[in-house]
Amino acid sequence: MLVPHSDLTDNHQPMEVVSQTETVNTLENQPVEDPPSSRFTWKIDNFSRLNTKKHYSDDFVVGGYKWRILIFPKGNNADHLSMYLDVADSASLPYGWSRYAQFSLTCFLVCTVLPYTQHQFNARESDWGFTSFMPLGELYDPSRGYLVNDTLIVEAEVVVRKIVDYWACDSKKETGYVGLKNQGATCYMNSLLQTLYHIPYFRKAVYHMPTTENDMPSGSIPLALQSLFYKLQYSDNSVATKELTKSFGWDTYDSFMQHDIQELNRVLCEKLEDKMKGTVVEGTIQKLFEGHQMNYIECINVDYKSTRKESFYDLQLDVKGCRDVYASFDKYVEVERLEGDNKYHAEQYGLQDAKKGVLFIDFPPVLQLQLKRFEYDFMRDTMVKINDRYEFPLQLDLDRDDGKYLSPEADRSVRNLYTLHSVLVHSGGVHGGHYYAYIRPTLSDQWYKFDDERVTKEDMKRALEEQYGGEELPQTNPGFNNTPFKFTKYSNAYMLVYIRESDNVKIICNVDEKDIAEHLRERLKKEQEEKEHKKKEKAEAHLYTIIKVARDDDLAEQIGKDIYFDLVDHDKVRSFHIQKQTTFNVFKEEVAREFGVPVQFQRFWLWAKRQNHTYRPNRPLTPLEETQSVGALREDLQPITPPYKTKEDILLFFKHYDPEKEELRYVGRLFVKSAGKPIEILSKLNKMAGYGPDEEIDLFEEIKFEPSVMCEPIDKKIIFRASQLEDGDIICFQKSLPLESATQYRYPDVPSFLEYVHNRQVVHFRSLEKPKEEDFCLEMSKLYTYDDVVERVAQQLGLDDPSKIRLTSHNCYSQQPKPQPVKYRGVDHLSDTLFHYNQTSDILYYEVLDIPLPELQGLKTLKVAFHHATKDEVELSHPDAELRLLEVFYHKIYKIFPPSEKIENINDQYWTLRAEEIPEDEKNLGPNDRLIHVYHFTKETAQNQMTLTKIKVRIQKKLQVPDEEFAKWKFAFLSLGRPEYLQDSDIVSSRFQRRDVYGAWEQYLGLEHSDNAPKRAYAVTQAISNLGVLLGMSIVIATSMFKDMEIEVKVSSISSEEVS
């Protein structure tokens, strides 16, 4: 994805920012100066040992400015190498600087990656490049050739020129149109939406879709699209698309993932088509975009033809190997001949030579052409982008050459002459890039470029010719020593939209407010008014202040329900929006009107944040302070002697705890004398709690709760001052419990209850098989051990053995389970299981195993392939059949494991393990028996038919090779890879050494034949498979990796004499 880098923290995602790739119109008529250019090569040694998150190159100068390359060796919050071009001295540049640069970043030695882009660099965006430059797996793959001797070479080619501020222009004022805001990686969607919006017939149909005032845009695609189109038509500023993406069911993560334009187009049209059913606009999607084609197969020698009619909303045209759209259409309708082994089976006529093809029955009024710029490269085993030059005309005639694209039943009276309406462009590579669109809304000569929020006027050349792709020379030579080089144009057309000229008037129609539902107009006008009101509030915010008033009622309502620590959540109390010049006495009158408390009964305290991060009432306001303005009260007031109470008075707040109900509640406040003792107020506290006056109670001071809870008992017999109690402190109390009854309760005292509340966590559990569906919730403590957690889950599931529960943590970024499960007792506490990087999740996944997890972790998983297994289950000749295990590497058998081999010594990571059944007649071998290897190999020389008596018959039977193919095979004895072809009279056993001689396993009986297995991109030219042949009383042939499958074959025994 093309993004500016940032030091991303927490859950922030990389933002895809608008890439200004063209100069603005005001510069077009200025004299053209040769733009400065240069090429810089950076050699990075010991690349894999780089431990820094960011790594900068040395500075180099282009255009009088210092530049440098910035890489993220481990990826910028992505599993790709991230690479950017950075303005090295951006912090010291003068205000308002900007530079426009065309640049490419290359990573090469054996192979080359050459993404090319352009960007306007300024103080806000001083670096630009590729977050997903190259997958780290490819970078570290030795066969790719990027890292050689742990050295990476990076090259930057830069062409620079000055440009005016990209953000300073008013798109509405300059062009009459507004853009769409990019949510992160939604440029592909923005370009498609602009294209659809500028098809007025489509826009009018969307406006006429029935919606109601009770619908919410975030839950209704029609209403969200109506709202979006309305704002595009009447707003003066760029429009957000969040409501529309929410109506798609996307979350924030989806908005940072690039989706496919064609897929989005189809899904959107299908949903709209479904919503239009039964309405006045039913069938609009089909009328605009649906065409029909005929697939046919016609026999050449008999009178038989098979046809099938299909509809399409868009056409995918090949780019590779085609010079223009007409060549793609020629290829689309190209006739394929079915003959030879590929004959067509016609009803009643059997296999027949035939021709197969596609012709068009009709084309739609709006023709959408998807250009196949991306395809799978089998040689490189990866997706690649096709940047070849591909031309497309302003006027497209699909009736050319006497209607060669049309089927016989097509209506020839319809003139299929189309004019180009829009060009959707992709700039970048296969791993990411940027999308924008060139559109001419009224089909006039004036084109417009819609690049997210920015809309500019453009000429026809930029909309057409410059989007053909291919290569181009820069305006001046940008290389060293005047050596010219060509830029590959990584910006090229990806989708084309044509409108049939005979339908122009109907499709490019007038759309005005009468086409928009009344409730939609009212809703959007109200939204605009609210927006203006908020804008005004923001502009006047410096004139106002907010005063939050917490009352005794708020404390009683919140403590024990919304909060347990401190006194009140200030975000949930009444707020007053007051002008700063208002006097506090006037504010008290407003409070009196709001709460019904007369002014003379009001006393206000200032709250203060203490060093232990608690927030408590500090002191009351003085009469002098209450005569001042409320703005003055926001200053840091000096502590003074509070009124209405003496120095000895302390204001304390009290909470009561009931261990039986596990309930903590606020019961009131008291003024106490600092020289008094808690024992003197016990009767008042009992009355607050509803106890008898002589009830024995215990007192605790709530001191703090972050980062850990501190709640200590209070000695009732010493004075308050000695206990360091002051204004605003909190005392929690409860009934005194006898020691024997304390064990009856989970949390018998205030400290244990507060500790529980501080660490409790509601965990949402999901089955690993259904990771999107919540199964159940459990309230747990963050201090729970692994055993505590699985025991609670087992209880919830009704499972007797908790050790059969396996947990998997949640990835907060991908919103998916982590790839590796939690190991048995692999974490100390629940909090460790829920923590992911710098975020804490509340989701865990579970699965129920067949065996206990400790036992499973003590087992070693081995991947074993059974020879000749054609089903999921292996069928043996009888239940007591004896098996043997072989070790295979690079198509050669290296070892047959004895039954005494330890499992821990067997490795299936680098070796292939194959199991096979041992025939009865092979279990007891005679002294003259030989065990040899047989393998396949391919050679380009001509092949002759040869036989090796019965051994060839047995090999053919084992491999199940047809006679016609097997007749072409040749046999050879191979020692250390050198073939010696065998004749019919050769005695095979005489060429093999005894089994106890070193090197015997490097001798093989070779089967030479052509390789019919499908090739992989990295396959070697020889297809070699191993076979083990036992000569004498029995023969065993074992093959491996033949056609990418593990197989095992068996034949009956023969004597060594019979071989010759």
Image (cartoon, rainbow, N blue to C red):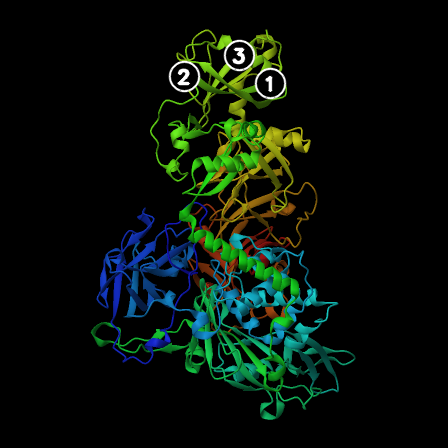
Task: Find disc 2 in the rendering and name its residue.
Answer: 646
Q: Secondary structure at mark 1?
A: loop
Q: Is residue 136 left or right of residue 235?
A: left
Neighbourhood count class around disc 3 (C-alpha, 10 Å): few under 14, some 14–19, many 20 upward: some
Tag 1: amino acid: Pro
Q: Nearer the viewer, residue 1015 or 148?
A: 148
Total count of labels: 3
Neighbourhood count class around disc 2 (C-alpha, 10 Å): few under 14, some 14–19, many 20 upward: few
Give the number of the disc on residue 659: 1
Which sits earlier in the primary sequence, circle 3 or circle 2?
Answer: 2
Residue 540 % position (x, y): 43, 51
Corner quadrant of residue 218: bottom right
Task: Find disc 3 in the rendering and name its residue.
Answer: 698
Q: Is residue 537 left or right of residue 957?
A: left
**Residue drawn at (61%, 17%), measured in percent from left and top?**
745
Image position of 615 with respect to 374: above or below: above
Q: Nearer the viewer, residue 816 or 12?
A: 12
Q: Nearer the viewer, residue 789 or 898?
A: 789
Q: Quadrant of the C terminus?
A: bottom right
Mark closer to the observer (1, 3): 3
Q: Is residue 288 left or right of residue 642?
A: right
Q: CA distance from mark 3 to mark 2?
A: 28 Å
**Residue drawn at (46%, 55%), measured in percent from left and top?**
536
